[in-house]
Image (cartoon, rainbow, N blue to C red):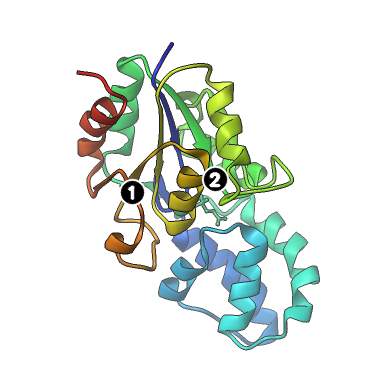
Amino acid sequence: MSVRVVFDLDGTLIDAAPDIHGVANSQLAPHGAQITLEQTRDLIGNGVSVLITRMLAAVNLPDTLHAQMLPAFKEAYLTAVHKTHPYDGVRDTLDALKEAGYLLGVCTNKPIAPTMAVLDHLGLTHYFDTIWGGDTLPVHKPDPAPLHAAFDALGDGPCIFVGDSEVDAETAQRAGVAFLLYTEGYRNIDVSQIPHTAAFNDFAQLPALVKKYAGLR
Ligand SMILES: O=C(O)COP(=O)(O)O
Ligand SMILES: [Mg+2]
């Protein structure tokens, strides 16, 4: 039996917004439109299909473009890794959690192919015993199924989900697991309005929080 810690990806382990911004603008350019990095942050969290719907709405382009944009967006997403970085302290914290003997996983709404591409590019893949993308199952967060699947893949033990958004909070609630909220990601509502077990703004705080909420002394 091991403590199981599953992480959201975008806005939690990595800041992927600059690369997603680049992909978004490469898709919008032929239509004479662009969005800002700030606008891009508000698009992230519900997967690529919702991201495109929100992007088109943000620049007043018709949603009829969605079907043609989706495959092109996913294709460009695969190589959009060079401006993406882990948040400060992420590597040290993942090392510390591994050292403590915990099992780690990822449950993201980013499709699995770009998820693997960016984790491989950043040298983070080896930390995780299981990785679930937004298209690994027919449903994605806030449906609790992928989070349940990630924890199940890690065996038995206390469950902690770490994420940055209201989508993650709802997923954790529906899955019935503890939720640690990273406050420096892409959430667009106040921390007080997001149900959470505990919040943190620095990854150095995470090992102690995991220990506490896993019920360890
Ligand atoms: O919306 C996305 O594509 C990814 O978001 P997530 O990693 O925060 O789930
Ligand atoms: Mg996120």
User: Does ligand 1 reach within 8 Å of label 2's beta carbon?
Assistant: yes
Number of residues whose C-alpha sits closer than 10 Å to that of mark 1, classed few (under 14), some (14–19) or many (20 or more): many
In the displayed structure, does residue 209 sit left or right of residue 154? left
For this rendering, which residue is in front, 217 or 35?
Answer: 217
Q: Secondary structure at mark 1?
A: loop
Asked whether residue 116 appears in the rendered view, the answer is no
Question: Disc 2 or 1, which lies upstream in sequence?
Answer: 2
Quadrant containing the N terminus is top left
User: What residue is shown at x 41% (from left), y 73% (from top)?
Assistant: 38
**Residue wearing tag 1:** 196
**Residue wearing tag 2:** 108
User: What residue is shown at x 57% (from left), y 24% (from top)?
Assistant: 152
Residue 62: x and y in percent read 72, 85
Residue 125: x and y in percent read 51, 30
Q: Are marks 2 and 1 in contact (CB under 8 Å)?
A: no
Tell me if residue 103 comes above or below residue 66 in the rendering: above
State the image quarter where residue 93 is shown: top left
Number of residues whose C-alpha sits closer than 10 Å to that of mark 2, classed few (under 14), some (14–19) or many (20 or more): many
